[in-house]
Amino acid sequence: MNPNLLSSRLNLSALLLGFLILLSMPARAQAPDEWWAPDWLIKSAYSPSFAVRDTVNKYGRYADKTKTITLADLIKFHGHFCGGLVESAGALRLAFDSLFPSGVIDRTDLRIASNNSACGGDVAAYLTGARTRFGSQLIDPKLTESEFVVQQVSTGKTVRVRVRPEAYPTDVRTQMRKLESGNFEPKDIDLFQDLQWEYAKKIVTRPLAETFVMLDSAGYVWPEAPCKALGTRKDNSFKAAPVK
Ligand SMILES: [Zn+2]
């Protein structure tokens, strides 16, 4: 057979084989339509994301691999995209940078205190693994909005972080007070969202240290657990068990 003809038949066979292999592969999952998280929020230069380490299973050891939590994940958990969520994520990014220089957050080894913000409290629980019912997520009304005290339990290392007072937009707070007063027009709801998103955009488009500041945590008195003792958390107890 003509060598050129043989070569072209082989090429055709390889092409056909490749096509058949492609057909037999499971369809790639379609990218999720994350309508709740605008591109500018997730893809901005300083959008915080979080590499976390957990255990593999209940009574399992530490996982070898980490998971990445994005603002889109936080919004999915919390329910909505609000200024408080982005603010809390930014503040905690700074806190974790100090607690975990390796960049990996150990969600089995943290306790955290925040005020009773619906938004900040959710971000605190999701990112730290702390839970109110196990006494590791604590509520301290003396802390300001998006102010957190975070402790690595095994070492006792503690950090405290908050929004720089000059970075907090007063128009957001003024509009929030107006809504909470009950004396508002429907357009005020939309204005509040616009102001919050504008604030969120500011947070994710400049270095986080321009919005947040670390405070001295020495002398911080942890509040009492808000729940009565309902039992000890045990699902992370075997994280450091030897392999054999
Ligand atoms: Zn919220």
Image (cartoon, grey):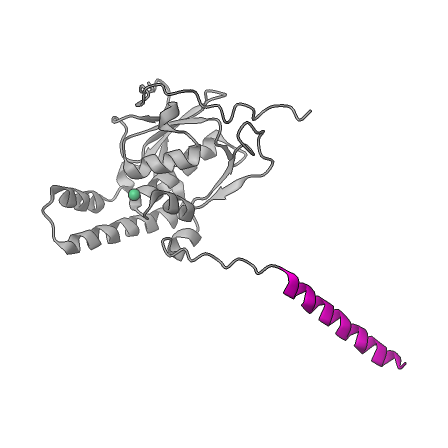
In percent of width and height, residue 127 lies at 42, 36
In percent of width and height, residue 113 lies at 34, 27
The residue positioned farthest toward the right in the image shown: 1
Quadrant of the image where one finds ligand 1: top left
- The answer to whether residue 138 is above or below residue 82 is above
Tell me which corner region of the image, top left, top right, bottom left or bottom right, holds residue 208: top left
In percent of width and height, residue 141 lies at 25, 27
Q: Is residue 19 visible?
A: yes
In percent of width and height, residue 152 lies at 46, 25
Which residue is drawn at the image coordinates 38% and 48% (left, top)? 204
Which residue is drawn at the image coordinates 51% and 26% (left, top)? 236
- In the image, which residues are magenta? 1-25
Asked if residue 10 is among those painted magenta in the image, a careful observer would answer: yes
Asked if residue 28 is among those painted magenta in the image, a careful observer would answer: no
Which secondary structure is most common in the magenta stretch?
Answer: helix
The answer to whether residue 232 is left or right of residue 20 is left
- The answer to whether residue 66 is above or below residue 231 is below
The residue positioned farthest toward the left in the image shown: 183
Q: Is residue 136 visible?
A: no
- Closer-to-camera residue (148/227): 227
Tell me which corner region of the image, top left, top right, bottom left or bottom right, holds residue 34: bottom left
Which residue is drawn at the image coordinates 12% and 53% (left, top)? 185
